[in-house]
Amino acid sequence: MLLQLCTWSEVEAYLKRSVGIIVPIGSTEQHGPNGLIGTDAICAESVAKGLGEAAEALVAPTIAVGMAQHHMAFPGTMTLRPSTFIQVVRDCVVSLAAHGFRRFYFVNGHGGNIAPVTSAFGEIYAETSMAPRDGRASSDARSPRDAGDHRGGVVCTLRNWWLRPPVVALAKELYGEHEGLHATPSEVSLTQYVYPQAIKTAKMDPAPPATLDFADAFDFRRRFPDGRMGSHPALSTPEHGRRFYDTVVADLAKDYRTFVTA
Ligand code: NI
């Protein structure tokens, strides 16, 4: 179920049976010679939609622009500065919490989002933790400020789809050391499965091994001239993408059920 395709009364009815919501969060950034600019948002969104169907859970609109300053030397990349991004995540959660949502399950598609999203969760929790105790019953909580204990309060979690153990195992089986760190064959395969009409081809050799030791966008492009970080996405196929999709949706469906009921 997608939030955008619900009426307000359907959301009201959903909240009577669940306080959980899935939030896809991605990035809009270069992904090497054959990877789509939207790769991270497409991956997060497709996995979140599949998870929403499997777990009968509501899926929020995708937060499609993330923290990608280091890719800005490549055309098409968009970024929010970390401080802006933290506020975007915070406002999205607080808006939904005002209606009664309490369990926020972020499905992330981009490594650069991990630090700011984790900081956003810290900002949200700080508001609850620092709110004055005013004696209102937590079971009647309608917003994070009113929620004084764990059960009444907001809980957020971040799941990075490409780091889930069954996904890592499949990437190792299919690509070994050619998976790399960015513009990986696993994420490109997933976009090829979701958008077969947008499959691109480009001549490339395997990239040399990469590290996460880089600074700004110009430093990044100097180190990684075609945008890849140690990866060989020419190995990508839509069939591989289908296997990644099925693997991660099954894995997260189990995990989501545990999270919303905890
Ligand atoms: Ni990516």
Image (cartoon, grey):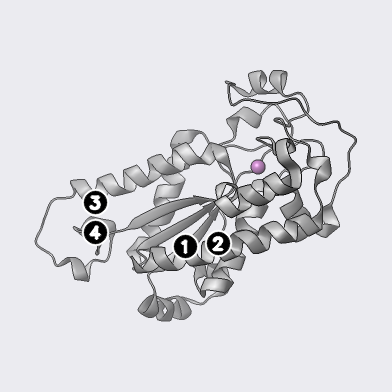
- Mark 1 is surrounded, within 10 Å at the Cα level, by few (under 14), some (14 to 19) or many (20 or more) other residues, namely some
* Mark in the foreground, 1 or 3: 1
Left or right: 92, with 3 as reference point: left
- Looking at the rendered structure, the secondary structure element under dot 1 is helix
Q: Give the labeled residue for mark 1.
A: 255
Residue positioned 42% across, 53% down in the render: 157
Tell me which numbered mark, 2 or 3, is placed earlier along the sequence.
3
Disc 3 from disc 4: Cα separation? 10 Å
Image marks 1 and 2: residues in contact by CB distance under 8 Å? yes
Q: Is the C-beta of the residue carrying label 2 under 8 Å from the nearest atom of ligand 1?
A: no
Rendered image quadrant of residue 54: bottom right
Quarter of the image with the N terminus is: bottom right
Residue 105 at what x, y percent from top left?
Answer: 45, 58
- Residue situated furthest left in the rendering: 135
Q: Give the labeled residue for mark 4.
A: 150
- Looking at the rendered structure, the secondary structure element under dot 2 is helix
Residue positioned 61% across, 67% down in the render: 50
* Mark in the foreground, 2 or 4: 2
Q: Is residue 227 above or below residue 105?
A: above
Q: Is residue 200 above or below residue 259?
A: above
Left or right: 204, with 109 as reference point: right
Q: Give the labeled residue for mark 2.
A: 251
Tell me which amino acid carries mark 4: His
Image marks 1 and 3: residues in contact by CB distance under 8 Å? no
Disc 2 from disc 3: Cα separation? 31 Å
Q: Give the labeled residue for mark 3.
A: 128
